[in-house]
Amino acid sequence: MIGCSSFTLESQDNKHFLSRTMDFQIEMAEQILFIPRNKEIGIAHSNEETIETSYACLGMGAMEEDHPVLFDGINEKGLMGATLYFPGYAEYSENIKKNQKGISPDMVIPTVLTQASNLEEIIDLFDKKFVIINDTNPTLGLTPPLHFIFSDSSGQSLIIEPRQGGLSIIKDSIGVMTNSPDYQWHETNLRNYLSFTPNQKESIELLGKTLKPFSQGSGTFGFPGDFTPPSRFVRTAYLKNYAEKPSNELAAITLCHHILESVSIPKGIVITEHGASDFTCYSAYMCSETLSYYFSTYGNQRIRKISLSESLKNEKEFKNFPIVNEEDILELN
């Protein structure tokens, strides 16, 4: 796994969005999982710690016995979150303090979304109640190295990175995240790209000749086009900054889809050291105000939507919504 790209966005009508790609070696887009309120759920693989859910939520995920796993999602208060790969940098706690509960890294998203209603409450949860522990996922046979991005209707974002010495909680990010290195490295690296602009370069005089740029796009000549996390971070940040601000939710989802397509990975383009193909299994786009979860998959690029409607929020049991990954072609004749 090389691991995903994510960013936040705001529309002109003051709606707020969190989007992400999921890049992995196996299919991850199999079902949307709904988690109801007032349910006891497990939060760690290696112990019997449980919590009672306070808020309903849904997202892409799977149910492992009584352990719901969400890769990303949104809750009924409009809090949105996603988990991304963080190899070589993630370090988890070996000790749980008194009155704290240990969470497996892959269960952070469902734990937070069922317990917190906004970003400030997330900070309070990790300060007083929860600690992310070094806990092996039995299916993967390893402890996945992960970091996390959250956003809500304030439009702000919160990046959480488990590091040596404790959690790094970043409140003032630009709302973009990919993978290793850590967030601060990526933000510093943006200084290498200050010359990039959507504007056309001007002609210059050189040795008695007037040299003009080739066609359009000369302001981005040399822009990083590879699929490494630093390059994906730069492309996502640039597009988020310069893209025309969308007027409404539909325009925002369309823009989010276009931005993520710039970092999406076709099968066969990135091969791991074990010979497996990393690819973008799915892209997800969430709206805080309408409690909507949109997604498109590798096998079906049609954008689909599921919302935390009043009827769904009041469901008492877990629900899953299977995903069809066959392309949906509109035939015109």
Image (spheres, rainbow, N blue to C red):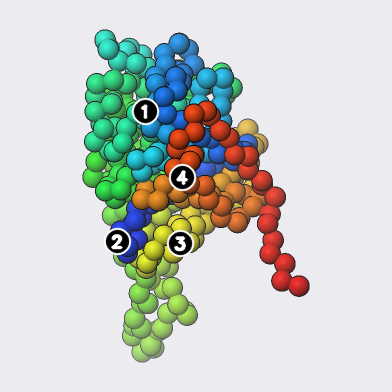
Mark 3 → mark 2, Cα distance in angstroms: 31 Å
Mark in the foreground, 3 or 2: 3
Mark in the foreground, 1 or 3: 1
Mark 1 → mark 4, Cα distance in angstroms: 17 Å
**Quarter holding residue 92:** top left
Mark 3: few, some, or many residues within 10 Å (few <14, many ≥20)? Answer: few
Relative image position of residue 10 (x, y in whole percent):
33, 57
Q: Give the residue type that dot 1 points to.
A: Ser
Q: Residue at x 54, y 42 (%)?
A: 23
Relative image position of residue 98 (x, y in whole percent):
26, 10
Q: Which residue is mark 4?
A: 309
Asked which secondary structure carries label 2, the reply is loop
The tag on residue 250 is 3
Relative image position of residue 234 (x, y in whole percent):
38, 54
Mark 1 → mark 3, Cα distance in angstroms: 30 Å
Q: Earlier in the sequence, mark 4 or mark 2?
A: 2
Mark 4 → mark 2, Cα distance in angstroms: 43 Å
Q: Residue at x 49, y 29 (%)?
A: 316
